[in-house]
Amino acid sequence: MRIRATVAAVSGAIVLSALAVPAAQADDGRSWTLEPGFTAVQPKVGEKSKQAFGATAKAAAPRITSAVVNAGKPIVIGTKVKKTVSFSATATADAGVGGVAAFIWTGKSIDDKDSFGYGPNAKSISCKVVSATTTTCKGTITLDPTEMINSDATTWRVGASAVTEEGDEFQAYAVSRVGVQSFSQLTVNASPEPVKKGKIITITGKLTRANWDTGTYKGYVNQSVQLQFKKKGAKSYTTLRTVKTGSNGILKTTVKATVDGTWRYSFAGKSNTAAVSSAGDYVDVK
């Protein structure tokens, strides 16, 4: 049975312990280190600017203004190797922000015992003070396929936790979203080669995708895959037809040999499975 970290763990203690830092001072051009691994640079702030920042009559509630993981692109994961992706998060508070870090999670709600997620790699995080009230931090999050199950190939929520320079903690559980996809593989073989002009070429292949339940690659059945051809000397492929995968993800179709060129299969992908194209197989037509 796999052990899965709960969302409560990644969105609470893990994130906020990384942000447990002393309040920063607004000295001109000052830099400081935020343990255990944060770095931030305070911009120069003149006396008039300091007075203007402090002139707000009513303090606004601290808030997470943005949190983006993997630049908003889907996170594609295989069966064995951990995948580390970047994040950027921004928070604002009248007291100033000591640090902010993103986390990702999937499930019905943040409090659901079956929800699952990952927090930031604390030592990866670096922060830049944008103004007296706003800080942006960047870092990484690592996903482990050995802890994941097939239903995790879906859209995850991106949250963030932050701490003010006065030590007050605040969070947002669903600032944005990011897709998590299983890695896919696609093969092709065109034969016979060489072949006489006018004869039949049989083009086989196989589409598989990462199965996190078993830690192996399994055939992806009943999927539409494009058969593509690139004539000798051409720069790009042309789609000739669509072929459906059969049992175990097997592909098979036949074409008449006309000219020299390269054959391949191409899969457009699904929301839970990454797109992939096979390597090309060149056939010499005699």
Image (cartoon, helix red, strand yellow):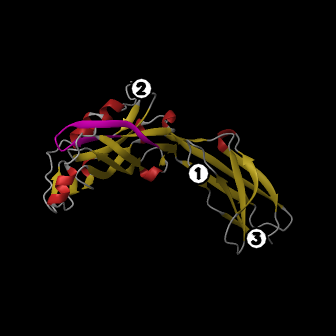
Percent x, y for residue 244?
Answer: 72, 45
Q: Nearer the viewer, residue 130 or 268?
A: 130
The three-letter code of the residue at mark 3 reads: Asp
Depicted 158 relative to depicted 140: above or below: above
Depicted 35 relative to depicted 45: above or below: above
Numbered label attached to residue 114: 2
Q: Residues within 10 Å of mark 1 (few under 14, many from 20)?
A: some
Q: For numbered disc 2, what is the local secondary structure?
A: loop
Q: For numbered disc 3, what is the local secondary structure?
A: loop
For mark 1, what is the residue? Answer: 275
For mark 3, what is the residue? Answer: 260
Q: Which residues are magenta?
A: 160-177
| Relative horizontal placement of residue 71, taking residue 95 as reference (left or right) | right
The three-letter code of the residue at mark 2 reads: Asp
Q: Does 178 lie within the magenta span?
A: no
Q: For numbered disc 1, what is the local secondary structure?
A: loop
